[in-house]
Image (spheres, rainbow, N blue to C red):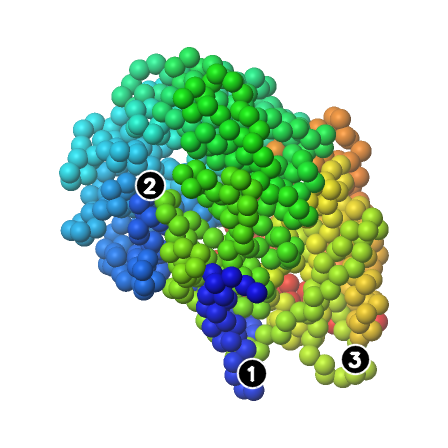
Amino acid sequence: MPNRAAALILSAFAVVSFAATAGSQTQPKPLTVEAIYGGSSIVGQPPANLTWSPDGKHLTYLDDGQLIEVDAATAQGHVLVSREKMAALTGSSGTEQDRDHRSRYNMASYLWAPDGRHLLFDSGGRLWYFDIQSGTGVNVADSGAASGDDPKFSPDGRSISYLRDRGIHVVALGPNGAQGKLTPAAGSSSGNQVILNGAVDWVYAEELDVRSNYFWAPDSQHIAFLQVDETAVPVYPIEDWIPTHATVDEQRYPQPGDRNPDVHLGVSGTKGGKTIWIRLPFKPGDDYVPRFGWADKSTLWVETLSRDHTHRAIYFSDIASGRSLKMVEMVDEKFVDDSYDVVVDSGSIVYTNWASGNVHLYRYTYDVNHPLDSAATFDRQLTTGNFDVTGIERVDAKERRVYYTSNEGNVLEEQLWQVGFDGERKQLTAAGCSHQVNFAPIGEAFVDRVSTRMSPPILNLCTEPAHCSVFWKARALDSYHLRAPVQLETKAHDGSTLYYTLLLPEDKSAAATVPLIVNPYGGPGPQGVRNRWSDSLLFDELLAQHGFAVLHADSRGSGGRGRNFAQAAYRNFGPVQLEDMLTVVDSALAQYGQLDPKRLGWWGWSWGGTFTLYAMTHSDRFRAGVAVAAVTDWRNYDSIYTERYLGLPAENAAAYRDDSVVNAAAKLKGRILLVHGTGDDNVHMGNSVQFIQKLIEAKIPYDLQIYPRKTHSIAGADVRTHLYTRILAHFEQNLMKAE
């Protein structure tokens, strides 16, 4: 039976589950592309920028232009900052790329001050210091940047830091806001366009999930920062053809085999003085620093990653001398797991590793009083079993326990667990749904986002695991009569279980056959088949209403299934994934006789777009496909991601040749629609251009849809409506008619 906490959360979740099925006898409301993508979300817009104050007493979020505060005791919301005042304090940057980066990397538009009485609003780079009691704001700084300015309060709350001209600046705060002269942190201000001090370059943000590259010392006397020197990194031009005189954004973008940015870790006093450079044994222009922080006011902890992704280590460094000592090391002959989060606190080092075959929690200890006297000591592996830990949510050193999420019990779900430093574990949330949590900095309070495949999210505020109350829930979808896909599974050739879902159109004629559209991601990392809400269900239902069956599946190489399952992608970007998808398709065809094996379609985005092209150039079974923002040559993509799986081009030329779909374009079968945003700084549009050139040489017809200035996400109600209308029309034109 579920524990009391689980029962409370589950009972709250039942409100939405019931709403989603209520009124099932009414006439169903048909879905349209415009209804899904043309305006506000059908399910409602979940709270944005959900943020806890440093004391854990205030939970706030943005909603319809207002800042809402949720009362921790009652879960009731009230307006903390009105729409009128917010209009003057917040704003979005002007460029498509800046808007995309703020959304993609979840950049905060406001921060809580350490005193819990002030807020800092970031309005396109202008920083406003807002007094909650008086309701007034003072402009304290202008970063000169629309995104990536990364403002922070010093721990004592007396100063604000932010990035400007690729360097860190500090401004002192007085009773009414800014006080005194703007001060560049010593050794960290740079007008050089290829040297970033504290700023995050593109590949670190995209591939290592780095969100900040500078941090205040606990005593507010120093700032540690990563210096990124991009001098030797090649430039990739991204052109904007909309103006009469076209402009070019020169992006520093290391591709496989190129020199990576040189990185150096420095420490500067906030009032000037000499910068201390930390000595670390990694290769300039090759290795990475995914994470770093402060162990105490005199000691940094630094995580390093080798360029080939086989070695990951944690060092302690003395800020006075720059001396470093290796505390922990992780090694894998193929590649280490890509969960780089580390928590160092009060004598404990907690991190994840898949050395035992699954991603689990490990704890090491060190001497708090003399952290650099000796390497850390292994304490224990905190979790064990045939499941993956999916996130470290909080480490409470005082109470000697770790809160984490994992897929224990059901690989398709995610639950919150607690484990003590002694290894004793307990589940804190209910099975039958998936949970995503956001803990307060101190105390036991957290936000629990709960959903299932068929029920959109609700948000609970939990003052502790046993006391949770709903403060936001999605709109009811009963009028659309959404139908659940069938959950299925089959076996891969190596015996691994492959999970997939199949959504069939409602029966119209027993004799009718049904075209099938396959829509996998297929690449490393994300799980596509989960018991968690995804807005993609709405487009699947729309396709089903138009007479298509829709299939989602995870192939070997994806995440959440342990080391061996993930490492199937090692030196293998296509063959094993296609083998698994064809196995899944054949399983569905064998079980559902109404599916027409001669009317198969495939579509995907990013890796999924590449997968679409791989399937249609390495199989003759698919009549139509849509490839959105696809990598067509793996030499075109970035170094961090690609080399992790395929190695260096000079050392593994065969994989780069055979797994790059551009080299098989002449074998394309079926009708393809290629889609790309001209401003895509992730998968450059050159990928589609190169593939098109090969199609022309082979005299193969194709369809093309470009979106000017749009980035990898191709965001915006107008273009999303246009895009999904084209996808639907492409499949109707090429799959609906039986042979």
In the image, what residue type sits under mark 2?
Gly
Among numbered discs 1 and 3, the one appearing first in the sequence: 1
Secondary structure beneath label 2 = loop
Q: Name the residue under label 1.
A: 24
Q: In the depicted view, which residue is nearer to us: 86 or 307? A: 307
Q: In the depicted view, which residue is nearer to us: 80 or 5? A: 5
The Cα atoms of the two marked residues, 2 and 3, are separated by 58 Å
Secondary structure beneath label 1 = loop
Task: Identify whether 21 is placed above or below 433.
Answer: below
* Residue 638 position within the rendered picture, expressed as x and y whole percent measured from the top left: 61, 35
* Residue 622 position within the rendered picture, expressed as x and y whole percent measured from the top left: 79, 60
Q: Name the residue under label 3.
A: 512
Say whether residue 520 is visible.
yes
Tag shown at residue 370: none
Task: Identify whether 116 is placed above or below 288.
Answer: below
Q: In the depicted view, which residue is nearer to us: 689 or 525? A: 525
Say whether residue 692 is visible.
no
**In the image, is 344 to the left or to the right of 361?**
left
Residue at (33%, 24%) from the top-left corner? 222
Identify the image quadrant of residue 591.
bottom right
Residue at (23%, 33%) from the top-left corner? 158
* Residue 549 position within the rendered picture, expressed as x and y whole percent measured from the top left: 71, 70
Q: Name the residue under label 2.
A: 125
* Residue 509 position within the rendered picture, expressed as x and y whole percent measured from the top left: 76, 84
Count every numbered label the image shows and give the total: 3
Among numbered discs 2 and 3, the one appearing first in the sequence: 2
In the image, what residue type sits under mark 3?
Ala
